[in-house]
Image (spheres, rainbow, N blue to C red):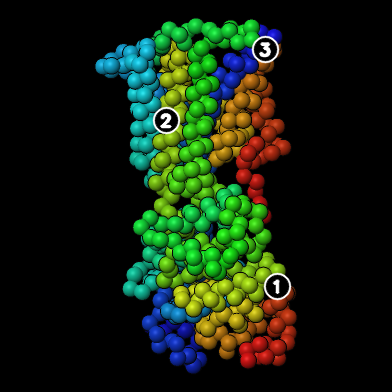
């Protein structure tokens, strides 16, 4: 029983990480039709930003309130990079899908190379508060606090994004734009401002994933973002492009399947199962769990 | 600067007014297809001007070019002016804010949003949305505020599509096939609403239902093979059965609306309607 609880909670921790990356990816794709392969870079910037701030930024540190400041710095850095990427690289290329893919893939490679050149290719130990290294006993399972922190953060981010989409003017524009972008402009709204905003939200969530993922794994390395991004893409497709709630459900499914199959089956089989799950969803429900159903 | 391609047609008196919209030599090419090949016409500053033509002749393409919604792969040439202002190459949201209201084909309401949210989306900072006016025209929209727009009937969706445009002041409305796919009773309701709307703002209307055209239109522009084939008084056009038949293809197998077919089959009824 303890093992099942532990596996479930670590699976949910993984799911939280996927969700933080996938939510922004999904909104960006749903609204702006941009397949952003550079999204993993925002995660890397968040992780390294937090790591750097904990060691160098006055007031920031690996523990207590200093750690909060370090994470805030990492998230701010990731958000800023996301906004710059949208304004400088993506904006001139809207509706030019192939060029967008080339630019974002190139950017993700260049970003990883830049992180490597600056701080080396090896994993660095991540500064983290002592309590995140400890475990909490839940129903007989000893669950790492770092994972619980991720789950709580993801739930809060989900709630914040949903509240934003539901209650604000820009949230309304984004929901409408995901459905029919052209019609939003035909009502006199400059939908591109919403694009920048969605990139900023996605960048912030991914950077938070980078910072808290660093806490969870205990290390930070340049390639982390890229490997998470693959699963985040799978989550986006399974959840339905443009649906934050769909991403949340899909992240939970993917995280749990991966964790349980990797434990009870051969290690690595869980990853393959996830890809199999993707194939099944694409065959049976191509629009994803919560995606828009194509209407005549 | 005569927009009419058919010389010899008597110019109705209304033609002396300064047009609200003038389209000159409009060409649209989309992925190799030369859909519009030098279309020129004007829209009178009052009443309804109807844009007619067979299916696929470029009526929707014309409206979309006016409001700046030609797909990115498309190429637009010519001039389009609303008053003294040139419209081409300006982004859609600016054109709309400048007073160009657009009610698209197939209504395009946001199905996942509520009726109230659909309307709220059209609100603009610095102006007071004319909810009184809209709810007076469509009391249903007020009652169904919390209902998802996707669960409305086709007619109600059309009312919503028109209503959200009327929340703001417009200098010209572009309305694309508002009665398409609606039941006959609802068609009449939509036509009534458009008639009232057209009392205060000029309308450029694409419409296949000739009964609606007869009721609303003052001027007509007929497109054929990517060009303007005929312009003039709408009722004159409808009285000329042979001309209507050759230009609009009604009466042939490709007629899209049964009502249009039946009316052309009995021109006597058409005349009676006009009295």
> Quadrant of the image for the N terminus of chain B?
bottom left
Image vertical order of residue B123 relative to residue A25, above or below: below
Q: For mark 3, give the secondary structure.
A: helix
Residue B107 located left or right of residue B14: right
C-alpha span from label 2 to label 1: 52 Å
Classify the position of the C terminus of chain B by image quarter.
bottom right
Asked whether the viewer can see residue A104, the reply is no
Are the residues flagged by discs 3 and 1 in contact, CB closer than 8 Å? no
Q: Which residue is mark 1?
A: B184
Judged left or right of residue B253, residue B213 is left
| B26 vs A183, nearest the viewer | A183
Q: Pointer 3: what residue?
A: A4
Chain of residue at mark 3 = A
Which residue corresponds to mark 2? A204
Q: At 63% across and 39% down in the image, what residue appears?
A: A290
Q: Could you say where residue B40 lies in the image, as x and y percent from the top left?
A: 45, 77
């Amino acid at each position: 029983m303890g093992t099942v609880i532990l596996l479930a909670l670590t699976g949910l921790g993984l799911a939280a990480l996927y969700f933080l990356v996938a939510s922004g990816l999904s909104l960006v794709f749903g609204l702006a039709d941009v397949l952003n392969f550079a999204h993993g870079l925002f995660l890397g910037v968040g992780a390294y930003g937090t790591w750097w701030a904990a060691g160098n930024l006055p007031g920031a540190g690996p523990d207590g309130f200093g750690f909060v400041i370090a994470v805030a710095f990492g998230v701010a850095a990731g958000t800023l990079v996301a906004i710059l990427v949208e304004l400088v690289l993506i904006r001139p290329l809207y509706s030019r899908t192939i060029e967008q893919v080339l630019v974002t893939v190139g950017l993700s490679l260049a970003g990883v190379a830049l992180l490597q050149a600056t701080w080396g290719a090896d994993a660095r130990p991540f500064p983290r508060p002592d309590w995140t290294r400890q475990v909490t006993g839940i129903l007989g399972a000893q669950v790492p606090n770092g994972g619980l922190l991720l789950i709580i953060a993801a739930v809060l981010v989900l709630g914040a994004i949903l509240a934003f989409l539901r209650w604000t003017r820009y949230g309304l524009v984004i929901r409408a734009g995901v459905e029919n972008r052209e019609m939003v402009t035909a009502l006199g709204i400059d939908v591109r401002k919403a694009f920048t905003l969605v990139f900023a939200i996605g960048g912030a969530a991914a950077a938070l994933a980078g910072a808290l993922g660093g806490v969870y794994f205990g290390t930070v390395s340049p390639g982390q973002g890229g490997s998470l991004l693959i699963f985040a893409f799978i989550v986006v497709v399974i959840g339905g492009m443009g649906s934050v709630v769909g991403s949340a459900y899909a992240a939970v499914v993917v995280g749990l399947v991966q964790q349980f199959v990797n434990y009870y089956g051969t290690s690595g089989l869980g990853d393959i199962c996830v890809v199999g799950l993707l194939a099944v969803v694409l065959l049976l429900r191509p629009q994803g769990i919560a995606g828009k159903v194509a209407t005549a | 600067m005569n927009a009419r391609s058919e010389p010899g047609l008597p110019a109705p008196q209304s033609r002396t007014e300064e047009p609200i919209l003038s389209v000159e030599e409009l060409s649209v090419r989309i992925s190799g297809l030369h859909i519009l090949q030098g279309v020129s016409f004007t829209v009178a500053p009052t009443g309804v001007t109807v844009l007619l033509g067979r299916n696929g002749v470029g009526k929707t393409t014309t409206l979309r070019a006016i409001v700046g919604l030609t797909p990115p792969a498309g190429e637009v040439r010519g001039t389009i002016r609303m008053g003294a202002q040139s419209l081409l190459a300006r982004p859609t949201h600016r054109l709309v804010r400048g007073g160009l209201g657009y009610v698209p084909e197939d209504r395009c309401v946001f199905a996942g949003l509520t009726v109230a949210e659909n309307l709220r989306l059209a609100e603009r900072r610095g102006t007071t949305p004319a909810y009184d006016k809209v709810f007076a025209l469509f009391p249903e929209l007020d009652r169904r505020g919390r209902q998802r727009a996707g669960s409305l009937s086709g007619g109600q969706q059309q009312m919503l599509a028109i209503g959200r445009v009327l929340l703001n002041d417009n200098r010209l409305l572009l309305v694309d096939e508002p009665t398409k796919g609606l039941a006959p009773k609802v068609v009449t309701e939509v036509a009534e609403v458009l008639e009232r709307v057209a009392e205060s703002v000029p309308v450029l209307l694409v419409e296949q239902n000739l009964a609606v055209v007869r009721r609303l239109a003052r001027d007509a522009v007929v497109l054929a093979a990517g060009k303007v084939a005929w312009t003039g008084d709408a009722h004159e056009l409808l009285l000329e059965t042979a001309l209507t038949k050759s230009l609009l293809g009604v009466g042939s197998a490709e007629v899209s609306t049964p009502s249009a077919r039946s009316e052309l089959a009995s021109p006597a009824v058409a005349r009676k309607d006009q009295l």
